[in-house]
Amino acid sequence: MTCATHPRIFSTTTRHLFEWICDIIKLFGILRMKAPAESSRAMVGIEALRELIPSLERRGYQVVGPVVRDGAIVYDTLRQLENLPIGWTDDQDAGRYRLKKRNDGALFGYVVGPQSWKKFLHPPDVKLFEVQREDGNFRILNNDAPRPRYAFLGVRGCELAAIKVQDRVLIGDRFTDPIYEGRRQGAFIIAVNCTLSAPTCFCTSMQTGPRAQPGFDLALTEIIDKGQHVFVVDIGSEPGAEVTARFEVQPSAVERVPRSRRSGGPRRRADAADGHHRHPRVALFEL
């Protein structure tokens, strides 16, 4: 007996319970793919990170991430690390969104843009089939186009939590969306832990950030301090470990992170340089 078929002799209540258990197992299967045998952490420089996009492309992924376009940070295809919004940040408040330059070369020095990853996982327009006219008759052609394999670079903790909600509704419920399921199972997620917050952010109250929760393949924490530009990499899955296997790893992240970044401070200390608020360091670097 499998989740696909079950005996008709079951009562209605038992059958519904069986279907519900199968849905949970199916959702757990997707989450289990993200679980590594043993979690690990490393620190890499920006040069090592430069190999990330080509490495993913060689594995058949279309890398999607943040780019600057039309005065906003939006999600689009990335070909190289230089496509990221290097040196840009966003100024957000109620009814206001503006981009402005930073005084450093941060790759992820912004909060979150106006778009979401849903347009890639659950697009509004999808071709289901084609109809071909032939000798006065119509033939229905199946849509056998290969599903895209996306690698999402720059997923924030709140966005990862939103993807999990979509998983519960479109995969883990009684009925499954096959298009979403196919795109979701093939997705490679590279999360980015937030070190900035905007007045409109509320991840701490919803317990969805600033640190990304399990469900990612890799998670990056960007550190720029005293001329050093490095990234703490948390490996969240076996595919993530394979991608980073050839990275040139630097000394332990804990020793390299300045003490001020590891100690707790005011919950929302204003940063005079960019007008954002810093998240508590302890939430990002607590081991």
Image (cartoon, rainbow, N blue to C red):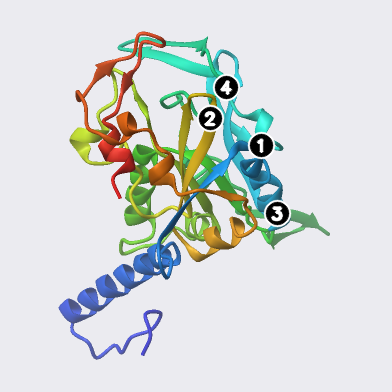
Query: What residue is rendered at 64% in x and 46% in y?
Result: 52
Question: Closer to the N terminus: mark 2 or mark 3?
Answer: 3
Badge 1 element:
loop
Which amino acid is tagged 4?
A: Gly
* Front: mark 4 or 3: 4
Question: Closer to the N terminus: mark 1 or mark 3?
Answer: 1
Q: Are marks 2 and 3 in contact (CB under 8 Å)?
A: no
Q: Position of residue 112 (x, y in %)?
A: 42, 27
Query: What residue is rendered at 18% in x and 81% in y?
Result: 14
Numbered mark located on residue 204 in the image: none
Which amino acid is tagged 3?
A: Val
| Residue 229 figure quarter | top right
Question: Closer to the N terminus: mark 4 or mark 2?
Answer: 4
Q: Position of residue 96 (x, y in %)?
A: 38, 9
Query: What residue is rendered at 45% in x and 23% in y?
Result: 110
Nearer the observer, 112 or 184: 112
Q: CA distance from mark 2 to mark 3?
A: 58 Å
Nearer the observer, 188 or 54: 54
Mark 4 — residue? 105
Q: CA distance from mark 4 to mark 2?
A: 11 Å
Numbered mark located on residue 78 in the image: 1
* Front: mark 4 or 2: 2
Q: CA distance from mark 1 to mark 3?
A: 34 Å
Mark 2 — residue? 228
Question: Closer to the N terminus: mark 4 or mark 3?
Answer: 4
Mark 3 — residue? 131
Please say if 63 is above or below 59.
above
